[in-house]
Image (cartoon, coloured by chain):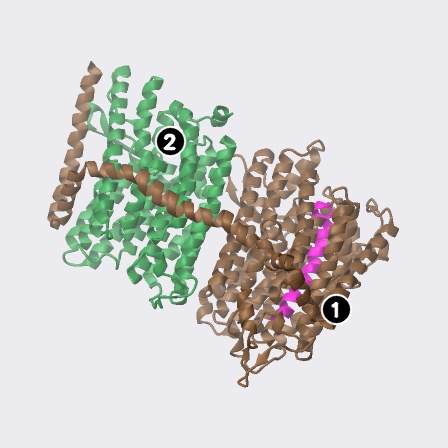
Amino acid sequence: MNDGLHLWLIPVLPLVGFVLNGLLGRRSPKALVSTIALVFSAAPFLLVLHVYTSFSALSLPYIERHTSWIATSTFHADFAFALDQLTLVMLLVVTGVGFLIHIYSVGYMAHEEGYWRFFAYLNLFMFFMLTLVLAENFLLMFVGWEGVGLASYLLIGFYFKKHSAVRAGMKAFVVNRIGDFGFLLAMFLLIIHFGTLSFIEVGSQIAQHPDWHGGVLTAIALLLVLGATGKSAQIPLYVWLPDAMEGPTPVSALIHAATMVTAGVYMVVRTHALFDRAPLALSVVAVIGAATAFFAATVGILQTDIKRVLAYSTISQLGYMFLACGAAAYSAAIFHLVTHAFFKALLFLAAGSVIHAVGGEQDMRLMGGLRRYIPVTFWTMTMAVFAISAFPPFAGFFSKDAILAEVFRSPNGGPLLWTVGIVTAAITSFYMFRLWYMTFFGHLRLQRETTHHVTLPVGLDDELLATGHSTNGQHAHGQPHGHGIHESPRSMLIPLVLLAVLSVAGGWIGIPHSLGGSDRFARFLDPVTHGTGVPASFEQVSIAMRTGAPIPTTEPPSKLEDPQTERMLSGCSVLAALLGLLLADTLYRRKPQLPARMAAGSRAIYGLVVNKYWIDEIYGFLIVKPLLIISRYILWGGVDRGIIGGGGRVLAGGTQGVGAVLRRIQSGNIRSYAGWLAIGAAAILLLAFFGFGAHIHMGVR
Amino acid sequence: MILPSLILILIVGGIASWIVARRSEVVARLIAVASVLADLFVCFGIWVAYLGQSHSTPERWFVECDFAWIPQFGIRIHLAIDGLSLALLLLTYFLGIMAVLSSWTEIRERVGFFHFNLLWVLAGITGVFLAVDLFVFYLFWELMLVPMYFLIGIWGHERRIYAATKFFLFTQLSGLLILVAIITLAVLHHQSTGVFTFDFEQLLHTALSPRAARLLMLGFLVAFLVKLPAFPFHTWLPDAHTEAPTAGSVILAGLLLKTGAYGLIRFVLPLFPGPSRELAPILMTIGVIGILYGAVLAVGQTDLKRLVAYTSVSHMGFVLLGVFAGNEIALEGAVVQMISHGISTGALFILAGLLQERMHTREISAMGGLWETMPALSGAGLVFAMASLGLPGLGDFVGEFLVLLGAYRANVPLTVVATLGLLVATLYGLRFAQSAFQGPNPHHWKLPDMRLREWAVLGLMMMCLVWIGLYPQPVLNGVRPSLAAAAKCIPAGNCQEIKR
């Protein structure tokens, strides 16, 4: 054991920030609050960098065990942290992107009430997320797992005076907990069948028993999938994520795009030893992923709220990651997780910058032509749009390409799921460029009064109200920035630029062989994703990571049978992206009157998609309403007060006299109470002895 | 003589504070705090002395006190303390202090008599947790009742007489069953051995016919299930909890319910292992019904205190499930659940009390948006709501997790259904937190935030919950030997055999 890494500090430091700001923030100046928040989110990032530099000297997985948490005769769970290649990647993403978003928030939230509360919650989130990532066992991961749910709940409901925000927070929490139900049951099964909750011990037990297949393993894996669908917003539990956009935009970027929602993917990869032996569960994951990717993308086409488009695209991209997991392409899933964290965080932050610029408006129909007013935002967002649409050489291209290639080859995937993936890629490109054109091109559709207050064009608000969108965005951004459209402050632009660089170049860490790269990312993760872990090869990989030298092939060459096919698949991806771009260009730049006509032409489908397939309404009708009715009218009104309470009343009524006596006791003066107490005690004693005596007789007889 | 003095301090303290209250109410309150604090320190001393040094305590009891009282019938004042009693006594005194502190401004009438009753209830509870002689146990069991009746009936809210009467009748009638069962057991023991005794440890060896054992067990069981409360017997609880003053609700939920669970663990399992085994599946089912029933009802309530009251029904369902799951893990979980439920629900009642003191209503619809005017109180409300819905890292989660894990070994389908209870718990937990504190503030409440005393009370309770949530080991180690004895009564896996 190499002491001196102090992994525990990585999650605990943000917790300190939370406690400081949570207790003292209300009375502190904003500068102090943001300093505390920034220091305690930068510190873990620096620590992770320190870990990164000393990484090659470690024997992996590196375990840091502190005290025991729950120890019983049959199992124990410790406060223990584990570090391996997967953890390192996640730590870099979470702390790096997290820190950038903290910086951005200083500018974005500058005029908000409850500034301190926001940063306290944000640090709390970092604590739970880092706990989740570093946990050595399922139970500690569960702490982080539920904890990020709590932080997400608090941040979605940050504008707690708004009913919709509060309700969205509740929805997120409840839906997440449905998933956690699966996680809990999976843990029970694990304890009973493995006697441990440690990831490593479970993995090694499975490795030792090559004959274990299916059965309990499938059950555990499927229960974990239920948990993952909740956290990562997959079908059927995706419904909370679009509503989560009620939270402030930096929150959407950090929690609902870059980090927390990827926890499900991380968990599947972390426990892939189980999934590898449960082909059924893998197929389920693949199908859920493909279906979600496609479904959410179609909803994204018609959304008009800029953040909701991004929310559905997040669900869709997470679907890709699930699809990759289902195809057992774990490193591709994590690769996409990383690049997605870059470009989706950027998309949200840039969207936040747009919203900030136009005074809190989120409806894209009122935007347009903004590229002239906010050039930095425009250019950084452009990078992100190209990245998510998977144009080479942007980051998204390489990771999406890796997923699609693996899906094509995998026995769990195959050409059918690949086709779904490629069609979704085209749709993705389409709706992202739609967003791009509607926001930045054409002419500005916002109208401003002479007093510089941003208001809606006459007539449009009726239509907006009819479609159920909030017209005044989320908060009072308009008031302090009433001087019209303006670029955001530097604290917001710096994170945008940095993330733009990463959205362009972030994919270059994993250029595949077929395109002349060395697939370094997959090789780096190989010891984790291939389970059995060959530590000998790791050092070579990590040396190669830094020097960029080709890796000596001690590993079995990856399943690259046919670079020709792979290149063809890449070509298809590029074509799909181009197709989407061209279509968006036609509909939203060259012939902007066309979409309305098309919508009028196919009212039924249009209505279905615009209303998000009525899924929320169906869930409400089938689950939420009945529960309330059962609680209020059947159980409370009927059973509890009627039947059971009725029994109680009969009992009480039969002894009405007693009640009357007791009432008299109550109305008497204080001194008589003592008397009654004494009489009561005596009566009990007498009763006892009397009863006792009777029984003696009985006994003697 | 340590153990009787625990009870005597409270009895004398109660009388003293009654007398003193005529001159100074503050002194009366201070006397009450001081006497409970004295007991707390004594118990803490015992804890340090017996659990701090070694993990294995060879003797059954840490401290014992045994002298004859009514020799003709073999009734002895036999008090003893082990890990289980000690843990529950620490909880008793901790919550006792919180109860006194939380009624500091709420109770303004008959202050002396209030504290007299409060301390006497605590004395009764102490006796219940300490008594080894069953007759003495029964006396203390009844002693809890009368002062509690006064607490509800005098200082309660609108429908206090109805609630107090209902509470009294339910517990009194079920108490009679226990008395009959105790006496019959002693008589049967006398018949078979010729010795008259009420001593639990000697009665353990009474030879009982299966039929007699079953009948006697039912006597004990009903009393304890009413107190717990288990599903069909719970109807006194929502009324009593809702109408009681804050301190009364805290003691009812935090302690009185625990005496029922304690009775199951301490007496029912060891005295009647056979019938316990037979009835275990039924009792576990009742527990699960209680979990879901209480939770679903809590979701629909419009009265804040009644909402919390129904969550108690749900949480105590977990305890019942754990007690009869027939393995040590579930039992340990049940005890942790008892302790953390005492604290978290106690805190929720205190919160409801603080709100009522400020707003003079308990109707949820009259609240909303309070975060704006009382951020600290609302933050505290959120923390305890999270504890109540079982967020990992806080005490309730450890208890519920262990109970479910243990129950899973005994009966998979029941456990799956019980786990659904945690899901419904999310709904009522969030309903508590949101309807009162979040959303718009339609009634334009402007209210004072928490005062220092209130901060201290809730802060301490919060710390205890975090402590149990993150480091439950002292509790688990402390109660393990006592539970090992009880767990042996339903040999591990027995329920499994019955089920499969």
Residue drawn 25% across the image and 39% down it: A649
Q: Is residue A187 left or right of residue A513?
A: left
The magenta stretch is: A324-353
Residue drawn 18% across the image and 33% down it: A684
Q: Which mark is residue A585?
A: 1
Residue A690 image-quadrant placement: top left
Q: Is residue B270 left or right of residue A140?
A: left
* Residue placed most toward the observer, A598 or A336: A598
Q: Give how far across and how far down residue B410 sits, in percent.
A: 49, 31
Residue B197 image-quadrant placement: top left
Q: Secondary structure at mark 2?
A: loop
- Can the viewer see residue B3 in this picture? no
Q: Indicate the quadrant containing the C terminus of chain A: top left, top right, bottom left or bottom right.
A: top left
Residue drawn 43% across the image and 35% down it: B321
Tell me the amino acid under the disc marked 1.
Asp
Q: Give how far across and how far down residue B76 sits, in percent.
A: 23, 29
Residue A247 versus residue B62 in the image, above or below: below
Q: Give the drawing colour for chain A.
A: brown
The nearer-to-camera label among 2 and 1 is 1
Residue found at the far right of this picture: A564
Which residue in the structure is indicated by mark 2? B60
